[in-house]
Amino acid sequence: MRGPVHGHPQRVRSRAYRFLRARWPVLVRLGAWSVLEAGQTFVVGYALARALDAGFLAGNARAGLLWLGAAGLAVGAGAYGTGRVYGVVAALVEPARDRLVTAVVARGVREADPGALSGLTQQVEIARDTLAGVVMVSRSFLFTSAGALIGLFSLAPLLLAVVLPPLLAGVALFAATLGPLARRQEAFLAADEALAQSLGEICPGLRDVTAAGAEERVAGTVGERTAAELRAARALAHWSLARVAALTVGGELPGVLLLLTAPWLLDHGVTPGALVGALAYVTQSLLPALDNLVHGLGTSGSRLTVVLRRLTVRDPEGRGTVSISGSAGGLDRPRTTRGRPASAPPPSSCALSVTSLTFAYGPASAPVLHDLDLTLPTGAHLAVVGPSGIGKSTLTALIAGLLTPAHGTIRACAAVLIPQEAYVHTGTLSENLSLHRSDPVPEQELLAAADAVGLTPLLRRLGGPDTPVEPAELSAGERQLVALTRAYLSPAPLALLDEATCHLDPAAEARAERAFAARPGGTLVVVAHRMSSARRADRILVMDGVRAACGTHAELLRISPLYRDLAGRWTDPAQLPSRSPLTPSPPRAISESRRSGSAPRSCG
């Protein structure tokens, strides 16, 4: 279980600021529609006062009705503006949810974090819902209060002097409770993660628990975790008393003070209509707005702060890991295989070392890989070819740590895996490309990476790095270029391209692969779907069931019947000995080639 995360508010605020700055047009629209709500608040109270003073109390019913009509029009305009606000809030909240889902899934895949289940199923949804609630209640209180206070001052400054002090006192009291409330909210989420982890470990083994007669012990453990979450929930609920006190002081006391001071106010020039208008401002505008703020922000705001901190702050242990879809790994992390001790990281001159690697998808299944040896020095460029379903993607998943081998050892430096289906999230292009860097990528570095991989035309067409991206509007090839550039910017030196260029034309594929091969200190493994891709590599690994052959293009033409078959189907056989570019044919030819070649099982 991860305990509470402390000491990172600055990082959370910095990320929130960058997120909002990239969406300033949405914020402008939100403010523009909210002005209608502030105008409604001002007009309703002011029109009611004028309807009494200049209309009904003055014997002019027509003027009174006109002022009331103006108030009705203001209510209609405010309702229209509030309706438009919901759509703008969705444009702000959904991209935030997409980013949180990406972060949680990446953390769960890379670090096998047991808290990722609670993060994905509950905490991300909490963050989305509470963010929407916080935006709505904060916006409403800000603009409603502004409209009401301006209206009070317009009616009579003395009215503002009576209402403003208790309102500020109530808001200050409420603000003082946010810190303790956030700490108790974080304790509740920690207890929730502990319970989720406990259930995740116990539920798959219920039959073993019953067979071992450990029901009481397991029930006691789950009961303790459940009781801990219940205590945290009760402690959180106790702070509702402080919220009630803040609401009483800031929302209800101003109305009481207006009634108590009414004779004095009337003696000092406040008109009856202005007094009634002030009561309308307090009871119909300020009190509901403060009530929404206290109950909405009091729970949702604290919960949002805690959840965002827990979902976005990196693991304090700084664990590095291989990641999927372009996530940068951190420190080298050796993987332990069955019956063997953890291996050491590869030597500095070696990016990848695989020894006696064996893997099957089930105990009764035939092995996909059997006793494979593979060594790649730093800076190597390896292409992996073979029929469809033969195990090429399995090999990259094993290297990336997504699968556990049945036998053998894998020693690899930090790696980035780019699969065939590229992921692009809602947000700016810069945010997509910087997803696997802990800090923002300098613009010059980002532009240089885009130029190297071939993303520059798309970047210019979209309008630059800070332009919002709609993933559904990008083609499959454009999404692959975004994912490739993101991986290129990753600090992980080992790049695993699992058919990551299948939607690109041959020229674009060649440019991207050459960019990765030329990365300083980088090592490249490509699952190739075109012979031209294999010909660019220094060495080629041919997979044929449990057998494998590794060598140069010329060597494999001599020793591997399967490679000769693949090369013949991919190209004109008369051109095989040459080094000229080859013309790719449809990938179906790969799946039709399944000859078994007797070839060495090691490469390196």
Image (cartoon, rainbow, N blue to C red):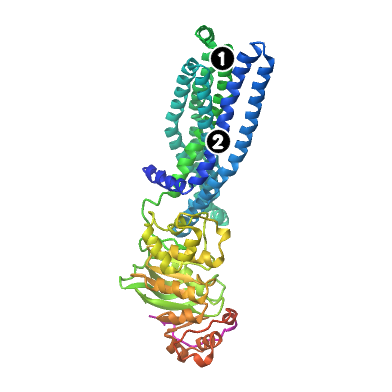
Which label sits on residue 275? Answer: 1
- Report how far apart the C-alphas of labels 2 and 1 lie in the structure: 26 Å
> Do we see residue 222 in this rendering?
no
Q: Quadrant of the C terminus?
A: bottom left
Which x, y percent locates residue 491?
37, 62
Which x, y percent locates residue 542?
48, 82
Task: Write the residue at 43% across / 68% down.
Answer: 453
Task: Write the residue at 55% across / 80% down.
Answer: 387
Q: Residues within 10 Å of mark 2 (few under 14, many from 20)?
A: many
Which x, y percent locates residue 132?
55, 41
Describe residue 604's horizontal placement relative to residue 424 as left or right.
left
Q: Residues within 10 Å of mark 1 (few under 14, many from 20)?
A: many
Q: Quadrant of residue 74?
A: top right
Task: Say which of 351 and 337 sits in front.
Answer: 351
Task: Say which of 60 and 552 sits in front.
Answer: 60
Q: Which residue is mark 2?
A: 34
Boundaries of the magenta span: 592-604
Q: Is residue 337 above or below residue 252?
A: below
User: Which structural element holds mark 2?
Assistant: helix
